Every structure is written in structure tokens, then in C-alpha cells.
């Protein structure tokens, strides 16, 4: 066990169980890089402000750079007995450069140090997540573009409803994902405020320059209240909330694809390389990846709940409970990154089963709203039109008739306004292209949506 940063005040050694129970090194070691970068900026500032000698700062910076190199090469040996990543790095630095290392923790506490490390980590991770989301959007867009002429029966309440372009359905995913990116980038914006210099929670009597540290580390702002700086974790909660909503979107997409890949739907084929089989039923090709994407949402929502509940009971300022924000944050970020990473190639390899889909478009009840609107255009009130078409659809279903095979007189029996010209709209193509209201599924509008997203996402084709 490395020497404790606070050991001198203690009359005896801590119990081994205390050490084991309080240690966070097993998970906060992930912050090692940020801990070093933060310390380098801090040491430079201490020297600039004449708080520590330049020569000591130079040694500290050199030592920390060498630790950064070790971390990069995978040569840094984390001490499983260290209390946390801060103690671990302090200890290794002391071994590397000797006494000068003792000056590094001047005008700093682990309370502001950990807040800094997490904020730096979050800012990087949000950039990485945004990139992955964009890749997924591009894969979805490509699938839509490549199948621009495909019309699918759309569903509400999981009952056949109306025709839409497949691309229109896929573009709806892109919209949600774009808002997810926006939520995460908003969270990043608010996390972009540098807490170091808050020290334990009240600031310091030493003449530090917090703006210099913020600039060195690429922060836009400096936190304005030292208590708030070490005590709040709303920036973590915001990220977790953003990830939770994103994960719900991913789950919903996965659920659509699972349904579409069933024999009953047969809209798509998921490539073998993204399916698994059954140990007992030789015929099975199961969409396990999609099911695990759907199932992972519980974990992420759990991570959000865990930090919300953690924060709810805390008084202001720093409390050690805050240590437990990290496993939840790391788990959610890892899980979402894994979900996105596998979803991208899965999407890229989806085959659209055009013939099977086309066979499902013969159901004329898909056009019932179009007939209602045909009657409205002929001056019939919405209510009356709904009644007329309701009776028409019911009779056809009861008798097993098609609306398109009814004669002029049979149609007239429902309404004098109902003519044989309705046959023109009783097909999927006509139905889709009637939906010209802004945001609707007509092909001209969908092509425009595709162009807009191609420009925005910078996709090649
Ligand atoms: N490991 C702690 C955390 O994650 C930081 C250390 C602060 N500890 C302390 N006793 N003040 O929040």
C-alpha cells in the first residue's frame, strides 16, 4: 500500500478492510491520463505564480510526461492497493523525481482534482459518442437512399395503418439521433467549466491563476463558486440522462428491426455475421445483437437512477459518496459505445426484402384515409366521409371483396360522390405521393430530407 496522502494525522494504521472498502483505483484508473494532464497544467501555473520554484515545476512536468508515456505504452503499473488514481500517480511521480513531487499538491485537493478529471473525461467521451452517432446516422441514411423506391406498410398500435416510404421511416431514426447528439453536446457545454482551484471546497489563500489552468486544459470557463465546484455532479447526471434517452432510441430501432426480420414480416434480412444460432433448434437465426441492444437499456437507466439517488441524499460540498458516481458513468458510456459500435455495421449489412414487402401492399385497407380525403376534396365533411369509408371497408372485409373491384353502382350505394376514379388512388405509390404536407412521406419531400441529411452528415453518396 502506498503512503497515504493524509497518513500523518493518524495515530495508527487503517484496517485493511477500510483500505479495501474505500479504494477506488480499480475503476478510477481510467482517469489516469486526465489526472496527469490536469497536474501538468497545475504545476505550470504554480511556477508562473511563483508559488513553487520553476525548477521543481519543470521536474514535475517532466515526470508527469513520462508517466503519460508509460500510460500510452501500457507500461504504467497501477497499484491495486492505492487509495485512488490521484494517490497512485503522486506515489509514482515521487519515485520518479523525488522530493519536488511533494510540491504538486499545493493549492489543490483531491476534491477539485476529481471533478476536473471527470469533466475532462466527459468532454472527450462526448466527442467520441457524437462521432459514433454520426456514423450510425450515415449507415441509416445509406440504407434509405439505396432503397428510395421501397414503400412499406406502416403500423400504428402494431396494426397495419398506411403506406410510407421505407426511407421516410428510416429518416425518423436520424432525427431522434440528431437530438441525442444535441443533448450530449449541451451537456458538454455545461461541463466545460474548470473546477480546479476550488481546493477542498472554499478556495485557497495562495495566489493561483485559475484562468491559466482553464486555458491550458482547453476549458471555456472557470467555475464561479468553490462549493458548487466540488459538490455537484449534475454534469454527470445530464450525460446519463442524455445516454438514457439515446439508448431508448436505439432500443426502439432494434425492436423495429427484430419485428421486420421475423418470418411474419419478412421486410429485412439481417446478415448472418450479425446473428447467432440456437444450440437446440438447428433452423434458428436469431437477432441476438438487436435483443442485447434492447436489453442494455435497463443497465443505462439503472446507472442514471443510481447517480440521481446518490446525489439526492447528500448535503452540500464534498462527500465521499461522490466516488460512486464513476462506475455508473463509465458503465453507461461503455455500454452505449458498444451498442453504437455494433449497430453501425449491422445496419450497413441489412438486406431489404423488396418482393416480400411489395406483396404486403395489396391490402386496400392501407388506403382508407386516402378515400376519406378523396371525399373531403369533393365537399363531404370529415365525419360523413369517415362513416362512408368505415361502412365500405367493413363490407369489403366481411365479403372478402376488394374496393377496387366494386362497380360504379356499388360504390354509389355508399355515396354519390364515390366514383370509379378512386381506383387511381388505391395503390401504394399514389397513396404515398398524396402525403405532400411538410414532413410527409411523398417521394419529393423524402428526397429533400435525404439531401438535407446528406449535406449535414457529409455522407459520400
Ligand atoms: N476518490 C474520490 C472521488 O472519486 C476523490 C478523493 C477525495 N477523497 C477525499 N477523502 N476527500 O470522489
Image (cartoon, rainbow, N blue to C red):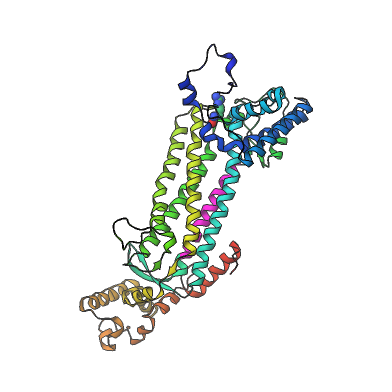
Most foreground residue, 71 or 325: 71
Residue 19 position in % (x across, y down): 49, 23
- Quadrant occupied by the C terminus: bottom right
- Quadrant occupied by the N terminus: top right
Most foreground residue, 23 or 48: 23
Residue 368 position in % (x across, y down): 33, 74
Which residue extends farthest bottom? 408
What is the quadrant of residue 113 in the picture?
top right
Most foreground residue, 16 or 207: 16
The number of numbered discs placed on residues in the rendered structure image is 0
In the displayed structure, would residue 302 be above or below residue 205? below
Q: Which residues are magenta?
A: 170-191
In the displayed structure, would residue 413 be above or below residue 227? below
Examine the rendering and report whether any part of residue 438 can be seen.
Answer: no
Asked if residue 186 is among those painted magenta in the image, a careful observer would answer yes
- Determine the quadrant in which ligand 1 lies: top right
Q: Residue at x 31, y 72 (%)?
A: 386
Residue 125 position in % (x across, y down): 57, 46
What is the quadrant of residue 272 in the picture?
bottom left
Amino acid at each position: 500500500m502506498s503512503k497515504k496522502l493524509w497518513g500523518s494525522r493518524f495515530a495508527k494504521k487503517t484496517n485493511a478492510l477500510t483500505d479495501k472498502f474505500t479504494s477506488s483505483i480499480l475503476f478510477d484508473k481510467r482517469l489516469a491520463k486526465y489526472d496527469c494532464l490536469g497536474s501538468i497544467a497545475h504545476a505550470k501555473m504554480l511556477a508562473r505564480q511563483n508559488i513553487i520554484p520553476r525548477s521543481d515545476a519543470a521536474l514535475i512536468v517532466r515526470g508527469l510526461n513520462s508517466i503519460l508515456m508509460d500510460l500510452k505504452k501500457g507500461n504504467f503499473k497501477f497499484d491495486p492497493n492505492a487509495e485512488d488514481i490521484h494517490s497512485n500517480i503522486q506515489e509514482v511521480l515521487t519515485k520518479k523525481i523525488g522530493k519536488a513531487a511533494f510540491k504538486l499538491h499545493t493549492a489543490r485537493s483531491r476534491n477539485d482534482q476529481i471533478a476536473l478529471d471527470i469533466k475532462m473525461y466527459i468532454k472527450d467521451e462526448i466527442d467520441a459518442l457524437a462521432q459514433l452517432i454520426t456514423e450510425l446516422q450515415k449507415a441509416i441514411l445509406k440504407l434509405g437512399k439505396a432503397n428510395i423506391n421501397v414503400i412499406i406498410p406502416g403500423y400504428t398500435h402494431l396494426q397495419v395503418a398506411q403506406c410510407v416510404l421505407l426511407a421516410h421511416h428510416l429518416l425518423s431514426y436520424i432525427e431522434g439521433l440528431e437530438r441525442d447528439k444535441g443533448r450530449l453536446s449541451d451537456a458538454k457545454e455545461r461541463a466545460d467549466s474548470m473546477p480546479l482551484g476550488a481546493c477542498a471546497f472554499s478556495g485557497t489563500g495562495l495566489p493561483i491563476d485559475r484562468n491559466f489552468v482553464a486555458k491550458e486544459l482547453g476549458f471555456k470557463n472557470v467555475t464561479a463558486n468553490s462549493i458548487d465546484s466540488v459538490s455537484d455532479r449534475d454534469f454527470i447526471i445530464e450525460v446519463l440522462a442524455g445516454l438514457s434517452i439515446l439508448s431508448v432510441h436505439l432500443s426502439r430501432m432494434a425492436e423495429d428491426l427484430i419485428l421486420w426480420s421475423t418470418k411474419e414480416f419478412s421486410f429485412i434480412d439481417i446478415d448472418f455475421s450479425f446473428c447467432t444460432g440456437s444450440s437446440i433448434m438447428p433452423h434458428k437465426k436469431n437477432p441476438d445483437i438487436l435483443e442485447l441492444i434492447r436489453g442494455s437499456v435497463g443497465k443505462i437507466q439503472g446507472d442514471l437512477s443510481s447517480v440521481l439517488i446518490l446525489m439526492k441524499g447528500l448535503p452540500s460540498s464534498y462527500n465521499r459518496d461522490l466516488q460512486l458516481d464513476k462506475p455508473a458513468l463509465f458503465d453507461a458510456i461503455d455500454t452505449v459505445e458498444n451498442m453504437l459500435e455494433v449497430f453501425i455495421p449491422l445496419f450497413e449489412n441489412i438486406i431489404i426484402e423488396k418482393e416480400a414487402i411489395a406483396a404486403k401492399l395489396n391490402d386496400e385497407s392501407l388506403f382508407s384515409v386516402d378515400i376519406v380525403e378523396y371525399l373531403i376534396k369533393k365537399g363531404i365533411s370529415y365525419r360523413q366521409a369517415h362513416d362512408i369509408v368505415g361502412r365500405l371497408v367493413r363490407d369489403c372485409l366481411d365479403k372478402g371483396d376488394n374496393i377496387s373491384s366494386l362497380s360504379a353502382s356499388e360504390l354509389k350505394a355508399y355515396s354519390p360522390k364515390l366514383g370509379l376514379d378512386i381506383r387511381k388512388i388505391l395503390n401504394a405509390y399514389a397513396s404515398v405521393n398524396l402525403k405532400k404536407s411538410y414532413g410527409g412521406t411523398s417521394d419529393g419531400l423524402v428526397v429533400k430530407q435525404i439531401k438535407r441529411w446528406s449535406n449535414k452528415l457529409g455522407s459520400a453518396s
